[in-house]
Amino acid sequence: MSHIFKRLSLSILITALTLSAQFSTNQIEIHGFLSQGYAYTVNINNLSMDTKNGTFEINEAAINFSTDITDRLRGGLQFLSRDLGKVGNNIVMLDWAYADYHWRDYLGVRIGKIKTPLALYNEVRDVDALRTFVFLPQAVYDENIRDFSFGFQGAAFYGNIALNQWGDIDYNLYLGTFNIPDPNNGFWNNAFTDMSNLASPLIASDSVNIGQMVVTDPEIRVPYLWGGSAYWTTIPGLKIGGCYLYTDQLMATDLTAFSQVTHSDGSVTNESQRLHFDVDVTMDDYYTLSAEYTINNMTLTAEFHNRTYQVIIPKGTFFNFNIAMNRQLQGYYGQATYRISDWLEAGSYYSVYKDYIGMDNDKPSWQIEQNDLCAALRFDVTPSWLFKLEAHRMDGTDLVLNVENPSGLKENWNLVAIKSSINF
Amino acid sequence: MEKRFYILAIIILSTVLPLFAQQNFVIILHKSVEGESLTRTNIESIFLGKKSRWSNGIKIVPVNLKSGEVYNTFIQTMIRKSPNAYTNYWRKMIFTGKGVMPLNCENEIDMLNYVNKTPGAIGYISNNTETGKHENVVVAQTPE
């Protein structure tokens, strides 16, 4: 199915560009952005970055092309290159590319590679110019799962339903699959590492002490995903709504377990064991509820996010029965921004993230939650060039990666970040 | 304490006062859509790209001034957004491929010329500006 979507997207892209060349009455719109940041933390390496030593490995660059192919049909694509520590590494990728048939204001269809309409800002999470802050609230916009949530390949129905004095509703309904270029990097690599951590206690015993687990030949198949979002603009400036996403991911890998085996005569030997490991991960309760109120220069935002998934290890992998485990994560934040002048904007948010039903229940409570108090200033030097400065006070480390902090974690830590970007 | 009160008062006033900004503009249309009923909600939907066709089926072509007092007042009173929030709204559409920002005209003469030659066009000019020789431009009843 994934291959079908890939071919379909490529066909649409080529068709759109060919048609746009043939119907040369409409010009091609070209836009782009470029940003560069710096982050420094005390005590903790944040996300996948070496922030304890200060890092410039935060950037995004994109360029897009779009055109009206006919009166109701648009086509376009955007290339994106980004870096966030060990993720991205400025490999240029197709960010979105789709044909958009706008039949009526209340119904249109998009086909191709599409940004996932999750929460208020997921579709534009890479566009630094659209927000006051360097980092979006991680409680809802978790950078660790960005690869999972940023886009999909398939089809989306969308529209705007006018309700006259009751405002209007923007909606999206979509179906498709993920295009996963490399399961050895980013979110998917972390997911396989989690898989190996799951397997470790299952193959350990009194006489077998499991040491390192190595993931080899990881594969992911996403048969399908579907979801939707709806946002109601009620009284002027107030937008409320939510989104929902369902996916089923079939993950398979070979695991090599390096272990110390204690034999009956008391001798200990180092052994390795290679085994095949299948997991079915069902994301069955992924939703975000959102409210945003804008009154002239002030914008107030609050969002609540829930993510529940079930991990099933099918029978035959380790035992002659299925093993099922659940995990639930929740996050929420409140945010206020205020445009003080044409060139200055200030903002602050407080976000809370918590691992409610985790797989690491033996951890102290501050390691399964993370609270973030952020204050930021944004300076618009020109309409298309800006500069940001922000500070965070963190309590907890649930979003921090253990692998980036081998010397241990600290409960309280601080982060400062600066960033500059241009767009056209 | 007193200082905090004044800061809070300034923030509240600067937030609320633009809502009461006096309308210093009139809405202009290409005569192909003369007689279309215009409400503030309609105009907001048009300039946010949510309404794309007039009732006679002609494609709506909204056009903005690039900047200035008339532009600021129009955006604040009709769209109920700050100019900065309005620009960001369209940047979001552009960088997700969902739409193209309305054309920006450098000045009112350019806007009159554009509306005059573009069926389905809608724009706005200062209420002191005459439409003059632009025979395809009609002034619409501006909603409060």
Image: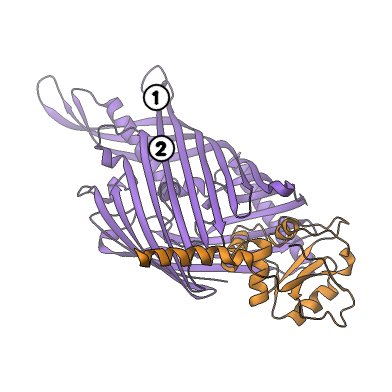
Chain colours: A purple, B orange
Q: Nearer the viewer, residue A14 or B111?
A: B111
| Subunit that carries the residue with mark 1 | A
Q: Nearer the viewer, residue A185 or A306?
A: A306
Residue B45: percent from left, percent from top: 71, 57
The residue that appears at 65% across and 70% down in the rendered structure is B73
Question: Vertically, is A174 above or below B8?
Answer: above
Please give the residue where the numbered disc 2 appears in the rendered image: A329
Asked if residue A101 lies left or right of residue A347, the reply is right
Question: Vertically, is A261 above or below A239?
Answer: above
Asked if residue A205 lies left or right of residue B86, the reply is left
Residue A347: percent from left, percent from top: 43, 61
Q: Indicate the quadrant where residue A273 lies.
A: top left
> Hey, which residue is sitting farthest top in the picture?
A320
Q: Which secondary structure lies at badge 2?
A: strand
Residue type highlighted by circle 2: Leu
Residue A276: percent from left, percent from top: 39, 31
Residue type highlighted by circle 1: Thr
The residue that appears at 34% across and 63% down in the rendered structure is B1
Say yes or no: labels 2 and 1 on the same chain. yes
Asked if residue A15 lies left or right of residue A221, the reply is right
The residue that appears at 26% across and 54% down in the rendered structure is A413
Residue A384: percent from left, percent from top: 54, 73
The residue that appears at 46% across and 64% down in the rendered structure is B9
Q: Indicate the quadrant where residue A20 lies.
A: bottom right
Q: Which label was assigned to residue A317?
A: 1
